[in-house]
Amino acid sequence: MTTEMNRYADFEHLRQQAVALRREGLSLRQIRDRLKIFNNDLLQRLVKGEPPPEWTKRPRAKDELRARELRLQGMTYDQIQVELGCSKSSISLWVRDLPKPEPRYTDEERRARMNAGLAHLRAAQDEEREKTKHLARESVGALSDRELFLTGVALYWAEGAKDKPYSRRESLQFINSDPNVISVYLRWLDLLGVTRDRLRFRVNIHETADVTGAEKFWADLAGVDRSTFQRATLKRHNPQTTRKNTSDAYRGCLIVYARGSAELYRRMEGAWYGIVEAARAQD
């Protein structure tokens, strides 16, 4: 189902481009060359309902002779239409007395060609996505202490345990499953002067997963000995559900608790509301 949805999204994205080019006055051949779509069936579907531009309309007599030549060469109506830029109804009138050529491709081959065209489009889109991400990543550069502090504050407020009027929790307790998020959080604690001996680590993971492997992974990431980890919290398996997080990359969540961190928690909360007020002031 997901694959079909992705194909539909790719087709619609490609159709938007093709229709825009058609309305700019490009011929089918120009659209084909611009979008690198060399499957005539797919090309016809992309511009279906869009009339050809006036400049592509040629003298009928010349088109008729050429259409008949192309039909005798074994071309389909769609292929002749791409070549000449005229309507399919006109082509039908010109060549209807000629024998119908054998299909150039089987249905399976046509689907394969269309899928290949969509795969080429997806590859180009993926390349563009990665280029955008790379440029954004390179634009960040080095972080100042202030930037790291504000980043950590926002990160904690999004993912960390918070103090409530009905439940006083003025201490830093953070949980996340993303190694990169944990790395940034630990670097933030370093900035605040929280040494590793003040931290307590615990893994929260599904009971059927590799608990030992997960603890080793998180211990290596945090730069501490696995023996310092508290007993893991195991999520009980529900037989009525199917686990999706079963890959080797699944290592549960890491809980990081900082002892004696009430003052740091208050600083974090105060800084967070300072960020909120500063953002509002931008209006």
Image (cartoon, helix red, strand yellow):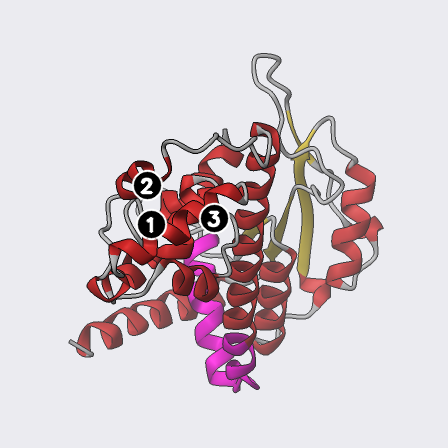
| Residue 236, x across and y down, in percent | 63, 22
Q: Give the residue drawn at x 48%, y 30%.
A: 100
Circles 2, 1 touching at the beta carbon (< 8 Å): yes
User: Could you tell me how far apart the alpha carbons at marks 1 and 3 are, in whole angstroms?
Assistant: 10 Å
Q: How crowded is mark 3: few (under 14 residues within 10 Å), some or many (20 or more)?
A: some
Mark with earlier residue (1, 3): 1
Question: Up-down: is 116 above or below 140?
Answer: above
Q: Residues within 10 Å of mark 1 (few under 14, many from 20)?
A: some
| Residue bearing the label numbered 3 | 70
Q: How many labels does the image show?
A: 3
Is 143 inside the magenta-drawn segment? yes
| Residue closest to the eye, 146 or 46 | 46
| Residue 53, x across and y down, in percent | 23, 61
Label 2, secondary structure: give it.
helix
Mark carried by residue 94: 2
Circles 1, 3 touching at the beta carbon (< 8 Å): no
Amino acid, disc 3: Leu
| Residue 109, x across and y down, in percent | 61, 35
Q: Quadrant of residue 211?
A: top right
128 horizontally vs 24: left or right: right
User: Could you tell me how far apart the alpha carbons at marks 2 and 1 are, in whole angstroms?
Assistant: 6 Å
Question: Up-down: is 107 above or below 78?
Answer: above
Question: Up-down: is 16 above or below 282?
Answer: above
Q: What stretch is highlighted in magenta?
A: 135-159
Q: Is residue 259 visible?
A: no
Amino acid, disc 2: Trp
| Residue bearing the label numbered 1 | 64
| Residue closest to the eye, 135 or 71 | 71
Label 3, secondary structure: give it.
helix
